[in-house]
Amino acid sequence: MNIYELLKTALTSDNIIIKETINEQCLAYCTQNKTISNPNKEADIFKKPSYESFCTIVNPRELPSRKDFDTNEGLATLIHAIAHIEYSAIDLALDAVYRYPFMPIGYKIDWLIVAQDEIRHFKMLQELLVEIGYKYGDFPVHCGLFDASMHTAHNIMDRMAVIPRYYEASGLDVNPQIVKKLENRHKDPRIKKLITMLDIIYEEEIDHVQKGDKWFKYLCDKENIEVETCYMSILKKYNLNNKHRPHINVQARKTAGFSCQELIKLGAKECK
């Protein structure tokens, strides 16, 4: 079984069922085999994300405002934005396996499990979108996560630092803030469902960031590089070190593997 050809099919497909089926096949295969043969060729650099066929991609500044949650459309724009992150995260996890075949079997299993979670997250958000009269693709999106994945494609250490340890960790900061804004509308059954979904996503995303942290530190140890110095230098390399972070979720990030020294450098006011 050539899991890399299968993963390429999943990564280029815009069908969530195809992604899910291939992910399950690859996860079962990796769980049952201690070694996986390397692919016959290098991984492709993709020119467009898999959602390009049904989503209108725009500059992030052109995205609709997500402040009015009292209307169906306003709530739908919020759910759609979160669903887009989860859909993007499916491909990020699959790509982490497809692109770096030299990594241990445990690494492959970890990211296929992450993809499994992200698929479930996306499907429940898509179901809620349909419930209120919309579907994924009805609103414009940006391709920032896809671009970041391709920019870091050449270097797995950069990938682990930038995607799980920067972008996904930033989600741990944002998720509780969204829930806080929604709580005074929790009597609306649709918003109650969304809050429940966000709570599930939050708990599982901590584990996803922790997996990224584990493999980033594995790579640092392998190269005998100090973790914090390496991480901050990679953020600087991609112009991510000076981004404004109004809320640093210290506890969640510490659970996921960040040190207090890193969190202070990232903007946390205190860390104990």
Image (cartoon, rainbow, N blue to C red):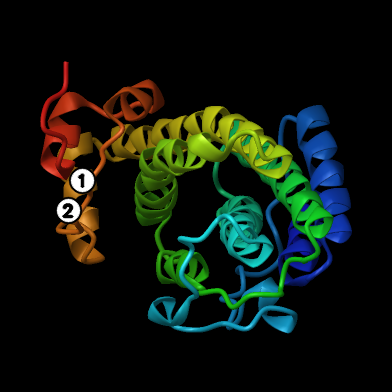
- Report if residue 1 is visible in the image: no
Q: Judge left or right: residue 56 versus residue 206.
A: right
Residue reaching furthest to the top:
272
- Report if residue 137 is visible in the image: yes
CA distance for labels 2 and 1 = 5 Å
Q: Judge left or right: residue 53 versus residue 69.
A: right
Residue 122 placement (x, y as % from top left): 71, 50
Task: Please name the residue that numbered disc 2 is placed on.
Answer: 233
Q: Judge left or right: residue 240 versus residue 61.
A: left
Q: Quadrant of residue 231?
A: top left
Identify which residue is drawn at 66% across, 53% down.
90
Give, as a three-letter code, the residue at label 1: Cys
Q: Judge left or right: residue 109 versus residue 2.
A: left
Residue 43 placement (x, y as % from top left): 61, 68
Q: Secondary structure at mark 1?
A: helix
Identify which residue is drawn at 83% across, 38% down.
29
- Pick whichever, 271 or 131, lies toward us: 131
Whether tag 2 and tag 1 are in contact, CB under 8 A, the answer is yes
Task: Please name the residue that numbered disc 1 is placed on.
Answer: 230
Residue 51 placement (x, y as % from top left): 69, 73
From what the image shows, is residue 114 above or below residue 136? above
If the image is split into quadrants, where does the C terminus sit? top left
From what the image shows, is residue 141 above or below residue 86? below
Q: Quadrant of residue 130?
A: bottom right
Q: Secondary structure at mark 2?
A: helix
